[in-house]
Image (spheres, rainbow, N blue to C red):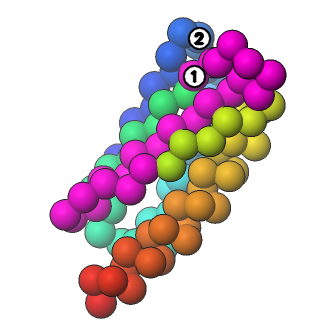
Amino acid sequence: MEIRIQSIKFNADQKLLDFVEKKFSRIEKFYDAITGVDVALSLLPDQENKNVKVLVSIPGGTVVVEKNAKTFEDAIVDCADILKEKLVKEKEKRA
């Protein structure tokens, strides 16, 4: 499973990139047929200005989750939790 990370309009530090890798490498436990994960990190003009959008490629489609938070870490954790639920449901549908 390949994890591609894109930071839009800013340069993400290595600590943040490592955090993204760590969180999203775990989702493979919930759906073993994941072909790729695309993570887009961006800044928004409002108060909760950290945006994380995750696209998980699975056979027959894509699972998309997007969250805003005050920190990238909070948004990443929220996305990972939601993805776990969605991937478990997808796996149950295909079983």
Residue at x 55% of width, y 28% of height: 41
**Residue 62 lies within the magenta run:** yes
Q: Secondary structure at mark 1?
A: strand
Q: How many marks?
A: 2
Residue 12 picture quarter: top right
Q: Indicate the position of residue 54 as horizontal and vertical percent values.
A: 47, 44
For the residue pair 44 and 54, the one nearer the viewer reads as: 44
Q: Please report contact status of discs 2 and 1: CB closer than 8 Å, yes or no.
A: yes
Amino acid found under the numbered disc labelled 2: Phe
State which mark lies toward you, 2 or 1: 1
Q: Indicate the position of residue 17 as horizontal and vertical percent values.
A: 59, 32
Which residue position is annotated with label 2?
10
Q: Is residue 92 above or below residue 85?
A: below
Q: Is residue 38 above or below residue 28?
A: above
Q: Is residue 94 above or below residue 31?
A: below
In this picture, residue 54 sits left or right of residue 73: left
Q: Indicate the position of residue 94 as horizontal and vertical percent values.
A: 28, 83
Which residue position is annotated with label 1?
42
For the residue pair 68 and 32, the one nearer the viewer reads as: 68
Q: Which residues are magenta?
A: 42-64
Residue at x 19% of width, y 63% of height: 60
Residue at x 50% of width, y 16% of height: 8
Residue at x 60% of width, y 56% of height: 80
